[in-house]
Amino acid sequence: MLALSFAETKFADTLKIEKRVTGNPVRDRVRVLAGMPYPAFDENGPIHLVVFGGSRGAKALSDIVPAAIALVPEPIRQRLRIVQQCRAEDLDRVAEVYRQAKVNVELAPFFGDLPERIAGSHLVIGRSGASTITELCVIGRPSIPVPLPGALDADQKNNALVVDTAGAGWIAEQATLSPQSLGTRLTNLITDPATLTKAAAAARALGQPRAVEKLADIAETLAGKGITEMEQRS
């Protein structure tokens, strides 16, 4: 039996065995956020954006995202509340870009409460590793996934495509991503809250907060079959 993270999984159809969609297990602190409603939009209220590039941050996101934010129209910039994880060596230059753009931002190399910050966000920009995509879907937040170039078997791109195809986000290839294109994308999304809200629902629909239980059920089923087969042989 093959346990799948998503119903649409590359190469899964080539394997002639039983398959079940279980999702990837997530931390308990992520599971408890699964039912947290998507933040409501206020016409003049804050817009919360979370940016991160994995456990150590991503230089490309530190280069592109602040420059993109600086191109967003000023009335939108004034409403932004940004949390961005970036490498320690990038902190000063990233802070300076945001300072000149007069944007409210919190920067750090690591956030211990990142799941909670994601749950409080309207949009997430980040890499698309398996754990990241799984947690975004369990929490139910829309995203702009930027796959890590050169990842083995393009796994991050395939993860991002699952989100994009489901309407839960908008894949952005690093090779073609620019401050101009990202700035335009952000402006269009922020001025269309209905699209973000719909994407959040689509992300939640992909989420599997009970992955641990589903995997345990499969293990018990297989163990039971194994015992039965052993008894039949004896």
Image (cartoon, helix red, strand yellow):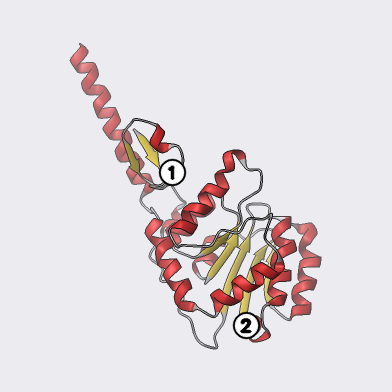
Q: Is residue 201 above or below residue 134?
A: below
Find the distance from the CA under tag 2 to the CA under tag 1: 37 Å
Q: Amino acid at mark 2?
A: Ile
Q: Residue furthest top?
A: 234
Q: Position of residue 11 (x, y in %)?
A: 45, 37
Residue under label 2: 76
Does 37 sit left or right of 89 as displayed? left
Does 173 sit left or right of 12 as displayed? right
Residue under label 1: 9
Q: Position of residue 155 (x, y in %)?
A: 55, 43
Tell me the residue at 65%/84% (across/down): 78
* Mark 2 or 1, nearer chain start: 1
Q: Which mark is residue 69?
A: none
Q: Which of 80/117 is in front?
A: 80
Asked whether the residues under the numbered discs 2 and 1 touch, taking CB atoms below 8 Å apart as contact, a structural biologist would say: no
* Label 2 residue SS: helix
Q: Amino acid at mark 1?
A: Thr
* Label 1 residue SS: loop
Tell me the residue at 43%/47% (across/down): 25
- Circle 1 packing at 10 Å, graded few (<14), some (14-19), many (20+), is few
Q: Which of 116/51 is in front?
A: 51
Q: Position of residue 70 (x, y in %)?
A: 72, 76
Quarter of the rendering occupied by the C terminus = top left
Tell me the residue at 40%/42% (across/down): 4
- Circle 2 packing at 10 Å, graded few (<14), some (14-19), many (20+), is some
